[in-house]
Amino acid sequence: MNKREDFKSGFVAVVGRPNVGKSTMINALIGDKIAIVSDKAQTTRNRIICVYTDEEKQIVFMDTPGVHKPKHKLGEFMVDAAITSLKETEAVLFVVAGNEKRGPGDDFIIEQLRKVKVPVFLVVNKIDTLKKDELIAAIASYNDFDFAGVIPISAKDKENLPELLKVIGSHLPEGPQYFPEDMITDQPERLIISDIVREKILLATRDEIPHAIAVDVDEMKTRNDGTTYIRATIYCERDSQKGIIIGNKGALLRTIGAQARVDIERLLATKVYLDLWVKVKKDWRNKSGVLSELGYK
């Protein structure tokens, strides 16, 4: 790709309450599945860098965990990752769900954004669920902040995403191409694979299970026949949770593995043998050492 002299680049933080569609928007903008998506709040746990590159610009999106009131050390890590991202960017996208009323979590984020020295854009997601007067009311509820712009979108339907990229690009400074044009994320394959497995657990379970699990890829190697062998451990906090994840005679664990394998094979472009194990690690979300071992640093 030939770069023009006036090539623009910059880092853009994506913040918002849990479950407003940040990861869905990022995946749609990048054109690939990098951040996991589910209808459970607090799905994203790490800050994920996703890279969009075209002939005129490179936008480095930082997809952050949803800002919420933390109840354990993992929650504190997630909120800190989101707030820290605001200090390292050329612009900030504050994503809200247009079909939800402004709440205390939004107010908390707004207070953090008041300290930011870069342009902040209000991105109103889920407009596919709104009538025109409802969209106008949703935007008006945030008129106490001086946004650099307001962009209504539907991440699910990919509506108005080109306009969002255009607006961001217009506010970026001239700069270098930070990453190769074919690079779309800084996440190691092992971390993406662990998140894929975790996503399938989120989709397959209910109640307390989604937030009490972590996935660690213990082994990953290419076999002589060209297939990739992956052994991963699913950690939960109680024996009862372990039983739920495994299911009757291992049925749910096999379903989780089969669904995860499809996405992993697409990611690696090879056949995969996925070997899943479930272990109990009591109260792991409150243990700093365990959080560090699992990649929450």
Image (tube, grey):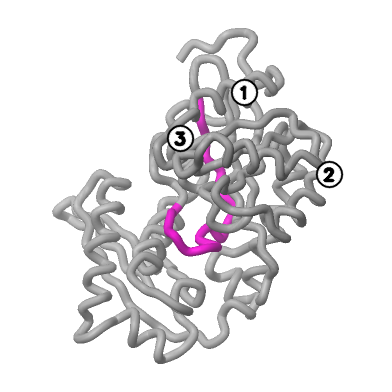
Give the residue pinned by disc 2: 114
Give the number of the disc on residue 167. Answer: 1
Q: Earlier in the sequence, mark 2 or mark 1?
A: 2
Tell me residue 287's x, y (percent): 63, 80
* Type of amino acid under label 1: Val
Tell me residue 33's x, y (percent): 39, 45
Q: Nearer the viewer, residue 72 or 127?
A: 127
Q: Residue at 28% of width from left, 68% of height from top? A: 256
* Vertical order, 116 against 287 (above or below): above
- Label 2 neighbour load within 10 Å: few <14, some 14-19, many 20+: few
Give the number of the disc on residue 30. Answer: 3
* Vertical order, 283 against 123 (above or below): below
Residue 45 belongs to magenta span = yes
Q: Earlier in the sequence, mark 2 or mark 3?
A: 3
Q: Residue at 49% of width from left, 11% of height from top? A: 2
In this picture, residue 20 sits left or right of residue 192:
right
Tell me residue 241's x, y (percent): 41, 85
- Label 1 neighbour load within 10 Å: few <14, some 14-19, many 20+: some
| Label 3 secondary element | helix
Disc 2/disc 3 C-alpha distance (Å): 28 Å
Residue 49 picture quarter: top right
Residue 270 belongs to magenta span = no
* Type of amino acid under label 3: Ile
Q: Are marks 2 and 3 in contact (CB under 8 Å)?
A: no
Give the number of the disc on residue 260. Answer: none
In this picture, residue 207 sits left or right of residue 258:
right
Start-end of magenta stretch = 36-53
| Label 2 secondary element | loop
- Label 3 neighbour load within 10 Å: few <14, some 14-19, many 20+: some
